[in-house]
Amino acid sequence: MSSALAFLAFAAHIGAGWRGGPRATVLLATQAFSAVWAGLNLGFALTLRPGFWIGETVVDALRIDGWLLFMVFRRVHHQSRWSIKPLCLGLGGGFVEAAALLRAGL
């Protein structure tokens, strides 16, 4: 529970100082995914219901992709951001593959 609250507090901190831009948007979305992920982990730990586990797995893929994308945005110069489109598509493809495997029950 403390991790979900920590992620929410950090997201609120980011939102309070909002200045826009792609980096801030990715970071805020990733914080939100991380908070939901932590809450779903807690729900699964307390109830052992498979719905929590499935939700946690999907949101975990979004969370990891978000952190990777944020790290890319941190390192790429503003003028060359469009050159990383293939990487962004690859991250999205990884999420789609994880969701497909989860749906197939693997």
Image: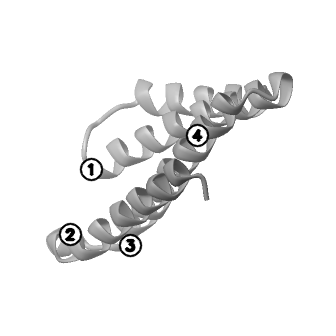
Amino acid type at mark 3: Arg
Q: Dot 3: what SS?
A: helix
Give the percent coordinates (x, y) of residue 14.
46, 34
Amino acid type at mark 2: Arg
The dot on residue 81 is: 2
- Asked whether, in this view, residue 49 is left or right of residue 15, the answer is right
Give the percent coordinates (x, y) of residue 17.
40, 30
Give the residue number, with chain letter if any, for mark 3.
75
Q: Residue at x 35, y 65 (%)?
A: 93
In the picture, the quarter occupied by the N terminus is top right
Give the residue number, with chain letter if any, for mark 4.
34
Q: Earlier in the sequence, mark 1 or mark 2?
A: 1
Q: Are marks 1 and 2 in contact (CB under 8 Å)?
A: yes
Q: Nearer the viewer, residue 94 or 24?
A: 94
Q: Residue at x 62, y 34 (%)?
A: 7
Q: Dot 1: what SS?
A: helix
Give the percent coordinates (x, y) of residue 13.
52, 29
Discs 3/4, front: 4
Q: CA distance from mark 1 to mark 2?
A: 10 Å
The dot on residue 22 is: 1
In the picture, the quarter occupied by the C terminus is bottom right
- Asked whether, in this view, residue 3 is left or right of residue 55, the answer is right
Amino acid type at mark 4: Ser
Discs 4/1, front: 4
Q: CA distance from mark 2 to mark 4?
A: 25 Å
Q: Residue at x 74, y 24 (%)?
A: 43
